[in-house]
Every structure is written in C-alpha cells, then in structure tokens.
Image (tube, rainbow, N blue to C red):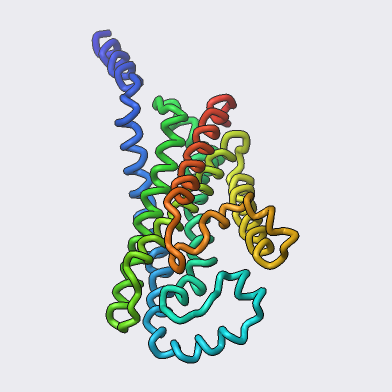
Amino acid sequence: MTTRVEAAAGARRDLTPQPALSVFGTLVRRGMRDRRRAPLSWGGSLGAMSALIVAIWPSIEGSISKAVRSYPRGLKEAFGIGELNNVAAYLDAEMFSLIVPLALSFFAVRVITSAIASAEEAGHLDTLLAAPVSRRVLVASALATAAAMSAVILAVLGTASWIAGAIAGSGLPLGRLVAALVGVWALAMLFAGLAALATGPLRRPAAVTAVATGTLIAMYVIDLLGKIARDVEPVRWASAFRYYDSPLADGLDPLAAAGLALTGVGLAAVGALLLERRDIR
C-alpha cells in the first residue's frame, strides 16, 4: 500500500506545471536539436550559391554591366535592377531579390507547421499538452525555434558569401550584407507568424503550409506586378516585399524590418489564442 501511495504521489508531482520559462527553453532546445542539420543543408546550399556569385563577379563585371543596359526598363524595375556596377547589386539581383527570401520564409513556415500541425496530425500534440504544456508556450517556442534556426542559416549564408568575396577581391561590403540578412530574417518571421496564426483554426499541416506559402507567393507577385504596372502599384502596400525592398543594394530600413518581425509576433499571438479555443485531435 505504501508503495502505491508513493507512486501516486510521484505521478502527481510529475504532472505539476513547470515554470513557463523552463518549459519554453526545453521546447526551443528540442526544436533546434531536431533541426541541427538545417544550417548545413539550407545554409550550406544557399551559401554555396551566393559564394559562387560573389566569386565570379570580378570576371564578369564589365560584361554584365553592358548587358544590363540593354534590358527592358520594365524588367529592371520588376527585379530592382539598376546599374549592376558592384557586387552588392549583383548579389541582390541574383539571390536576395527572390531565392533567399522565399527559401528562408518557407523554412520558417515549415518549422511552425511541424511543431504544431504535423504534431497534431501524428497524434503527438495531445500527449505534449497533457505534460502539461501551455499552448501559448508551445506557439512561442515554435516561433523562437524558427527565429533562431533562420538566424543560424543566414549566418552560414553570410559567412560563406563574405569569405568568397574577400578571397576573390569582389569588395562585398559587410555592412550591406548584414543589412540584407536582417531584412530576410524579419521577412521570414512575418510568414512564420502567419503560419502560427493558421494553426489556430486549421488542423492539417498541408492546409497551414498552403495558407502561409500561398500568401508568400501572392505577396511576391503583387509586389512584382506593382513595379511593372502603374494600375497595380497602389496595391503594393499589402505586400510584405514592399517593406523588405532591397536591403543589400539600398540599405536596410530599420522601421520596416522591425514592423515585419513584430507583425509576425502579433500574428503568432493571435494564433496561440485561437489554438487555446479548440480541441486537439
């Protein structure tokens, strides 16, 4: 009898709610450990592409500048191509205008989706929440994991690009490169927050991913069309890419970057509230 009483008391102690900060830290560490290969797979791949572009710049500088002068004006405006007379403008046109923002935003969305919607579909989420873990802490930890891993990936990307530029003598400005990385990170946090918002009412990971990535692509298209067609230009305010702009070529707008990141946090907070109001299957 004594053994049973002690076992029951131990079980009750195990179910005693732990401090939210402690649970938050545990979930973030677990999330980062689960994605420990991301800096190599994502950061290494994107870093290799950027490093190659930076490395070949000295050999194509003269020819690419002449070629750009013959591009249609609409094409140059759509992709933010001015005079490609420096490596920062070239790297921005090749990587930071499309590939890097889309890739990092998609990665951040997948981190949120796997931590919440995929866990629910697999039947793991109800067990985790019974630990007990607050749903607000769960969403906050998923967002923090996305933020931390995105920052690490961008650090790998930036380091590879800068080293390649230093070796090749391309003259890639470190300040502009850091500005571009911060701008991409802020944009990714916006769409991570949107994914967290979608996990509130939606249960299936495919639906959450479709909403977040569909909005990502739609915003890019709106911004692209707004640069080409004057009739669409007033609608550009609804696109996050308007505020992301071209930090590598033109410098970072701190207010715009902070607004993107904070909007993502706000969307995630609403998503946490919506998640608290529905049953977990």
**As rendered, which of 247 and 141 lies closer to the eye?**
247
What is the quadrant of the N terminus in the image? top left
Q: Is residue 271 above or below residue 238?
A: above
Residue at 28 percent of width and 78 percent of height: 166
Residue at 38 percent of width and 52 percent of height: 149
Pick out the residue farthest to the right: 231
Whole-percent x and y of residue 211? 63, 47
Whole-percent x and y of residue 204? 61, 42
Q: Is residue 2 left or right of residue 271?
A: left
**As rendered, which of 77 and 160 lies closer to the eye?**
77
Whole-percent x and y of residue 23? 34, 31
What is the quadrant of the C terminus in the image? top right
Residue at 41 percent of width and 28 percent of height: 133
User: Which quarter of the figure has residue 271?
Assistant: top right
**As rendered, which of 140 and 72 lies closer to the eye?**
72
User: Which quarter of the figure has residue 218?
Assistant: bottom right
Q: Is residue 54 above or below residue 43?
A: below
Residue at 45 percent of width and 68 percent of height: 249
User: Which quarter of the figure has residue 275?
Assistant: top right
Q: Is residue 180 above or below residue 195?
A: below
Q: Is residue 146 above or below residue 90?
A: above
Whole-percent x and y of residue 30? 34, 43
- Circle count: 0
